[in-house]
Amino acid sequence: MQRETLGRELPILFFLKTLIFSYVLTGAFLALLSFMLYKFHLGEKVVTIAIILIYVAATFFAGFVTGRKMGSRKFFWGAVEGAAYFLVLVLISLVAGQEGFRSGNSFVTTLILCAGGGMLGGMLS
């Protein structure tokens, strides 16, 4: 009986592992973007679009993996994973002292992109 419980993780632990890995993925993509910015002198619009794509890709991955693990209501768990990703992003921004991220259109848009990316990943899992 003990062997059965060792192989199974608590859903919250798996959820946190997936969230952490999505931030590792975000960091890798941002490092690649910064290298491309340095080498190719990308414009502001290109960098903004790339950052949006990085958010969506990271939350898509997190939602996809979480949806596979949870089995039922995959879209819901994907959206929760995306919203959690956004919440951590907001907390990091607040600690870093970015005043402009707290309110306005970018706040809501980023929330929708993160939750939507996670939901899409969950639906396609």
Image (tube, rainbow, N blue to C red):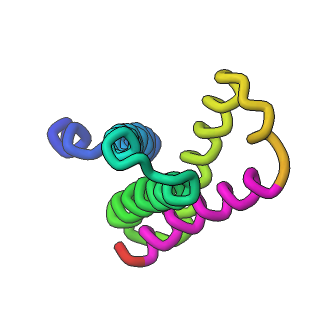
Q: Which residue is outermost to the right?
A: 104
Q: Is residue 88 left or right of residue 63?
A: right
Q: Which residue is at 60% across, 39% downward? A: 89
Using the rendered view, name the quadrant where residue 38 is placed: top left
Is 89 drawn above or below residue 61 in the view shown? above
Q: Which residue is at 72% across, 23% downward? A: 97
Q: Which residue is outermost to the front?
A: 41
Q: Which residue is at 52% across, 69% downward? A: 119
Residue 36, horizontal then vertical, whole percent? 34, 46
Q: Nearer the viewer, residue 53 or 95?
A: 53
Residue 50, horizontal then vertical, whole percent? 47, 57
Q: Is residue 33 magenta?
A: no
Q: Which residue is outermost to the bottom?
A: 124
* Quadrant that contains the C terminus: bottom left
The chief SS type of the magenta part is helix
Using the rendered view, name the quadrant where residue 116 is placed: bottom right
Q: Nearer the viewer, residue 60 or 12?
A: 60
Using the rendered view, name the quadrant where residue 71 is placed: bottom left
| Magenta segment | 105-123
Is 64 drawn above or below residue 19 in the view shown? below
Q: Which residue is outermost to the left?
A: 3
Q: Nearer the viewer, residue 2 or 112?
A: 112
